[in-house]
């Protein structure tokens, strides 16, 4: 049951994915490394130093919550991103990517800026590349889920938010295939979470860009797309509505764009189940009121 306090809680600006099975992810990663060593990619397999570094990372992640800053050692970052001509974990074959992405998204939620800020290409673009239509990773079940969670966590982490903000457009561009009804529910939730975080970057002017109008159109088009998804799960719908609320807070241009996309009709077409979470009905009423208010200005 939802308590009155929970129902009255303000909607989030940024959401994250904190829960994780650190040891299981590390064990699966080491299992895949052994398969690569014995088979299709011996040059991709982890060496003993890299394995030790990942074990140390897991030990640190196990210690504290999201509030405890984590300095990622350069060698640990390089294990993920590659160096010296080696591709790193993010360059593993697509079916083997998910445990590395799982550990990475947990690290990105707590990571300090140092080290991540010097990566080239930037971390955000490395992750959005995995979601690109036609990429081998995008066709997998688990890899897109973990990449979406990693991007959401990066934007949710105040230390990394300035590094994520310049790539809000790339994040939004990656989302459409994962918000629709063909994606698993967990993937839709991750995609709606990233939509919310990217929308909050726009609202907070963290993603200051010359093409703010284009970014608003991207975000609101994705909201419209998600609202058209039949039987969108309750929490995913809530985060989509929060995304709409965040975009409307950017100014009058957002309301005009929402009107051009006929988002009000999409909201009117929503059929919320009896006994659902009050926060969804409250947020739906709030965005309707915001649209009505903007239309009168």
Image (spheres, rainbow, N blue to C red):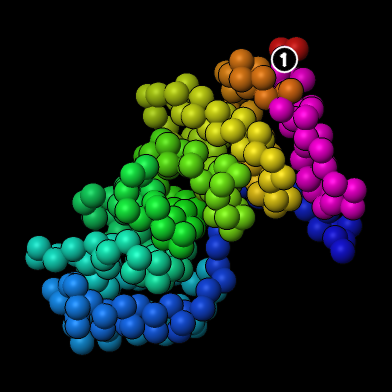
- In the image, what residue occupies the spot 26% across and 83% down? 34
Q: Is residue 4 left or right of residue 218?
A: right
Position in image of residue 115 (x %, y %): 27, 62
Viewer-closest of 230 and 262: 230
Does residue 196 appear in this view? no
The number of callouts visible is 1
Q: Is residue 78 above or below residue 127?
A: below
Q: Is residue 107 left or right of residue 249?
A: left
Position in image of residue 230 (x %, y %): 69, 40
Q: Is residue 116 left or right of residue 291?
A: left
Label 1 neighbour load within 10 Å: few <14, some 14-19, many 20+: few
Q: Secondary structure at mark 1?
A: helix
Magenta-colored stretch includes residue 129: no
- In the image, what residue occupies the spot 35% across and 65% down? 95
Look at the image and tell me in which quarter the C terminus lies.
Answer: top right
Magenta-colored stretch includes residue 282: yes
Query: What secondary structure is the magenta-colored segment mainly?
Result: helix
Question: Which region of the structure is painted magenta?
Answer: 266-295
- In the image, what residue occupies the spot 85% across and 47% down? 273
Position in image of residue 47 (x %, y %): 19, 83
Look at the image and tell me in which quarter the N terminus lies.
Answer: bottom right
Q: Is residue 170 above or below residue 156?
A: above
Q: Is residue 93 above or below residue 126?
A: below
- In the image, what residue occupies the spot 46% across and 62% down? 142
Q: Is residue 38 left or right of residue 180?
A: left
Tag 1 residue: 295
Does residue 212 appear in this view? yes
Quadrant of res 75: bottom left
Residue extending furthest toward the top: 296
Viewer-closest of 95 and 235: 95
Position in image of residue 130 (x %, y %): 34, 52
């Amino acid at each position: 049951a939802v308590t009155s306090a929970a129902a009255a809680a303000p909607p989030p600006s940024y959401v994250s994915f904190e829960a994780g099975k650190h040891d299981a992810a590390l064990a699966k990663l080491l299992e895949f490394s052994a398969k690569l060593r014995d088979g299709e990619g011996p040059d991709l397999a982890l060496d003993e130093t890299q394995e030790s570094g990942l074990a140390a990372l897991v030990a640190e992640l196990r210690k504290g919550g999201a509030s405890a800053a984590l300095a990622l050692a350069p060698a640990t970052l390089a294990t993920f991103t590659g160096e010296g001509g080696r591709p790193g974990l993010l360059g593993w074959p697509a079916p083997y990517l998910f445990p590395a992405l799982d550990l990475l998204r947990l690290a990105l939620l707590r990571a300090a800026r140092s080290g991540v800020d010097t990566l080239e290409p930037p971390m955000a673009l490395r992750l959005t590349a995995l979601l690109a239509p036609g990429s081998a990773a995008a066709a997998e079940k688990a890899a897109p889920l973990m990449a979406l969670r990693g991007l959401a966590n990066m934007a949710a982490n105040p230390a990394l938010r300035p590094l994520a903000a310049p790539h809000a457009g790339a994040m939004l561009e990656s989302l459409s295939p994962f918000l629709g009804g063909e994606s698993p529910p967990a993937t839709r939730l991750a995609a709606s979470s990233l939509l919310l975080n990217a929308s909050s970057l726009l609202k907070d002017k963290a993603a200051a860009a010359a093409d703010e109008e284009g970014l608003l159109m991207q975000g609101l088009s994705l909201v419209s797309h998600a609202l058209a998804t039949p039987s969108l799960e309750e929490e995913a719908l809530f985060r989509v509505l929060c995304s709409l609320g965040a975009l409307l807070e950017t100014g009058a241009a957002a309301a005009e764009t929402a009107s051009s996309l006929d988002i009000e009709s999409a909201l009117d077409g929503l059929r919320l189940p009896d006994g659902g979470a009050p926060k969804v009905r409250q947020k739906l009423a709030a965005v309707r009121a915001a649209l009505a208010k903007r239309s009168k200005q």
